[in-house]
Amino acid sequence: MKTKNLIVSFTVLMIAWVLLNWTIDPVNLIIGASISIFLVVVFCSKCELFTDIKITPKAFIYTFIYLFVFIIELIKANIDITRRVLSPKLQINPGIVKVKTKLKSKMARLILADSITLTPGTFTLQVEEDVFYIHCIDTRCGDDVEKATEEIVRKFEKYLEVLYD
């Protein structure tokens, strides 16, 4: 498991390096690989960040599906917030809702919490095992945990289950 963690950490760092530099020049790649190896050896030799991730063709495909779903949800949330700002007569009902997740992996829960927070109108306040407390600009579901979970969590969770659990 430790080897998988090191390989995935290196791969993530190299992808980030290439995306930040936007070039595949051999000299640049050697510099990026050197920095990535150094960071992996120094910081990731004892961490268990990517030990739960599944490296399968299905997981690879679901990663892109997850990103697509996240971008769609991001666009929908931005349109909703823009509509609320431009038309203040739209009623808002801010509050904190409690949702539950079926995800077992710490990394999957982290990605879920970040995805919720990155979506405008929602903010993950606290995570306690399988319970998340989320501030929403409109708490239509009120105190109904199942309804809130269905509206906020399930759209992301079903893809993260394939990747991590």
Image (cartoon, rainbow, N blue to C red):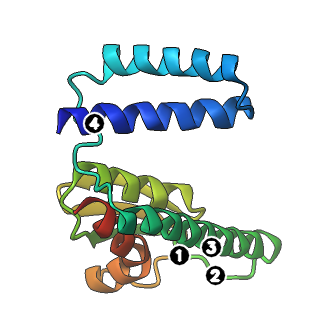
**Who is closer to the viewer here, 51 or 103?**
51
Residue located 29% across and 71% down the image: 99
Mark 2 = which residue? 91
- Crowding at dot 4, Cα within 10 Å, few <14 / some 14-19 / many 20+, comes out as many
The tag earlier along the polypeptide, 3 or 2, is 3
> Which tag is nearer the camera, tag 4 or tag 3?
4
**Three-letter amino acid code at the position of disc 2:** Gln
Labelled disc at residue 138:
1
- Crowding at dot 3, Cα within 10 Å, few <14 / some 14-19 / many 20+, comes out as few
Give the CA separation, mark 1 to mark 4.
Answer: 39 Å
Residue located 40% across and 84% down the image: 141
Q: Position of residue 42 (x, y in %)?
A: 33, 13
Q: Position of residue 60 (x, y in %)?
A: 43, 61
Assess whether mark 1 and mark 3 are in contact (beta carbons under 8 angstroms): no
Q: Quadrant of the C terminus?
A: bottom left
**Three-letter amino acid code at the position of disc 4:** Asn
The tag earlier along the polypeptide, 4 or 3, is 4
**Three-letter amino acid code at the position of disc 1:** Asp
Mark 2: which secondary structure?
loop
Residue located 46% across and 77% down the image: 139
**Three-letter amino acid code at the position of disc 3:** Ile
